[in-house]
Amino acid sequence: MTDLSFVRSDMLPERAPPANEVGMVKWLRTNLFSTWANSLLTIAAFYVIYLVLANVLPWFSGGVWTTSSLSECREVLQGEVGGCFSVLTERWNQLIYGFKYPVDLYWRPNIALLLLAFAAAPVLFFDLPRKLLLFTAIYPFVAYWLIWGGPIGVPVTAFVGILGAYLVFERFNAANFAAAGLAAVAVAFSLWFIGGYLVDMLASDDPLLTPVASRDLGGFMLNLMLGVTCVSLSIPLGIALALGRQSNLPLIKGVCVIFIEFIRGVPLITLLFVASVMLAYFFPPDATVDLFLRVVIMITLFSSAYIAEVIRGGLAALPKGQYEAADSLGLDYPQAMRFIILPQALKISIPGIVNVAVGLFKDTTLVSVISMFDLVGMIRGPILASQEWNGVYWELLGFAALLFFVVCYGISQYSQWLERRLRTDHR
Amino acid sequence: MSSITLDHHADRSKMAVSDEVAIEIRNMNKWYGSFHVLRDIDLTVYQGERIVIAGPSGSGKSTLIRCINRLEEHQEGQIIVDGTELTSDLKNVDKVRSEVGMVFQHFNLFPHLTILENCTLAPIWVRKEPKKEAEERAMHFLEKVKIPEQAHKYPGMLSGGQQQRVAIARSLCMMPRIMLFDEPTSALDPEMIKEVLETMVELAEEGMTMLCVTHEMGFAKEVANRVIFMDAGQIVEQNEPEEFFNNPQSERTKLFLSQIL
Ligand SMILES: Nc1ncnc2c1ncn2[C@@H]1O[C@H](COP(=O)(O)OP(=O)(O)OP(=O)(O)O)[C@@H](O)[C@H]1O
Ligand SMILES: [Mg+2]
């Protein structure tokens, strides 16, 4: 055995790392050229990128923006490479608002979109003052009135009904949850009934905002409206379904399970056809339920089933101890859900919910199949079928893809920010 | 089995037991499905008692104390806590839970809330206290468990011992008359066990009624006025700690003690 004892007599000074281990060189070496195979892949990848850009960039830079038909484009281009982007400028209004929304009323959906930013902000960024939520609460009614116009009594009645229901529920919730819920529903319906009468009686022939029919909505505006409405309705419905599926009461649980499994087993397009032709049978014969509303109901039901399953996963991921701690502190079921369980379960579910939301938003283009003229419907129908623009596929579909990409990428970035913001462990 | 020595000796003179009944369990039986976990449990706990419950794994210790605040339901017999009988009536359950605090083996803090919010949530929403008052009291108890400076951190940023002390403070904020502990130190390293046990000793010195499932026999000798030994869902033996450790009567108790001491 050698002597194992060792004592350091002088301490080592700090040295700079070797030159090829820092900066750009090191980065290139480790990330792009670490082995022979990787170097080959890097070179191949650069070549592919070059090929794509070499073809796409001239198409953009040589593009034509000011002609009024495809044949004029061809004349201007004279066989040179270049996109015919004139279709976007010439048909801009149709792409955004559809072809029937009155041109002099475009300011109304524009304002509705602007206000949406203010209504959504306190929901998306919860560091903002909570008072802003009051505006969020009235926004749906304002937006309805702006976009559809007509007698102001309609959105006011709808709002009063919901407000009444909310007040009644708050008043009696402490005493009895179920009874308060039933009373709230009863109050809402009676207020709507009375309001409906009043609106009919008072309706003037010349309302402040000219009414616009649902079938006149179109373009990307229609996609945005469907997307925003359905996402904001399907998240609460999804939460309710997920909680219902966990319920101890067999009836509630059974209804939720059957609903979720049924909806998930049916293609959305089928549900949309049902909405467009068959749903009328389920409503009273004289009720003309708006096509937009029917579509909203179907898309909401569809995505809420998916969201419910995503949230169920989040609920299942919570340790049983969280429920027990909430119980042992005396929190009742709604309190435990609101303060302890759902905040954590929803946080886990964010990526899944966003996944469903992005999918839902893109699926709103399916309404073009039931002859609603959303962005894709406009492109496939009136624009491509027109004499001037027959054949301009790349530019139009590329534009549609770009619009959807911008929105979906925004949603995805927001969700990543939210996840970081909510991370409270291992900091 | 570990046996942590506490730095300061508990002052037993302050731990007075009154003859007011805190918990009365009569002929209680519980089944999990067809498995008979608790059999004919009879137990009277007086105000101010510190009871340590010991026994081999699976003997039903956790189940017993979880029945006392109805995290588990019993099927036969009676459990009366501070004059309120636990039945399926939710009002009674809520009343009992507001008087009984519970500390779990795995702390069960709410990870998405700060330490302070953990401590004020239930007082604000269950006891309907003003936020300011609840926060003041939470800070008082956090000082008592010696971690006021962590109030604005999240549970994930604290050590296990600190988390368990927060859990104790969180229960105390509800002003319970009885505290239940289910192996509060089994998930902790020795150094942290000591912090937590010392907090519990202080609590005992203030006259809190405590039921504690633990393997810390040092704590039992120091603080408990009664040790209950359970096996196979039954109370096999109970006695003052001195007698229990030095002069166990039943064979099962002797075997158990020989294994852990
Ligand atoms: N939810 C449950 N369903 C079915 N059986 C259970 C359940 N919880 C516990 N048991 C069983 O009941 C018995 C008693 O469990 P309990 O947790 O009360 O034991 P314990 O004395 O606390 O044991 P330990 O020291 O391991 O914590 C065990 O056999 C256990 O397997
Ligand atoms: Mg146990």
Image: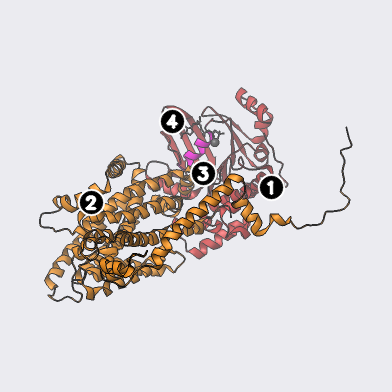
Chain colours: A orange, B red
**Looking at the rendered structure, which numbered label has been put on residue B106?**
none
Span of residues in magenta = B60-71
Look at the numbered disc 2 and give the secondary structure of its residue: helix
Helix or strand or loop: what does disc 3 sit on? strand
* Category of crowding for the residue at label 2, using alpha-carbon neighbours closer than 10 angstroms: few (below 14), some (14–19), many (at least 20): many
Q: Is residue B67 magenta?
A: yes
Q: Which residue is mark 1?
A: B11
On what subunit does the disc labeled 2 rest?
Answer: A
For image coordinates 65% across by 31% down, the residue present is B244
Question: How many other residues sit within 10 Å of disc 4, few (<14), some (14-19) or many (≥20)?
Answer: some
Badge 4 amino acid = Trp
Residue placed most toward the observer, A245 or B151: A245
Check the picture and name the quadrant holding the C terminus of chain A: bottom right
Near mark 3 (Cα within 10 A), the count class, few <14, some 14-19 or many ≥20, is some
Whichever of callouts 1 and 4 sits on the residue coming sooner in the sequence is 1
Q: Which residue is mark 3?
A: B22
Name the residue type under label 2.
Leu
Q: Which residue, given by chain and number where applicable, does mark 4 sit on? A: B31
Q: Is residue A162 above or below residue A181?
A: below
Q: Earlier in the sequence, mark 1 or mark 3?
A: 1
Label 2 close to label 3 by CB (< 8 Å):
no
Front tag of 2 and 3: 2
Q: Are marks 1 and 3 on the same chain?
A: yes
Position of residue B97 measured from the top left corner of the image (x, y, whole percent): 46, 47
User: In terms of depth relative to the viewer, which is nearer, A84 or B117?
Assistant: A84
Badge 3 amino acid: Ala
Of the image marks 4 and 3, the number of the one nearer the N terminus: 3
* Rendered position, A183 above or below A200: above
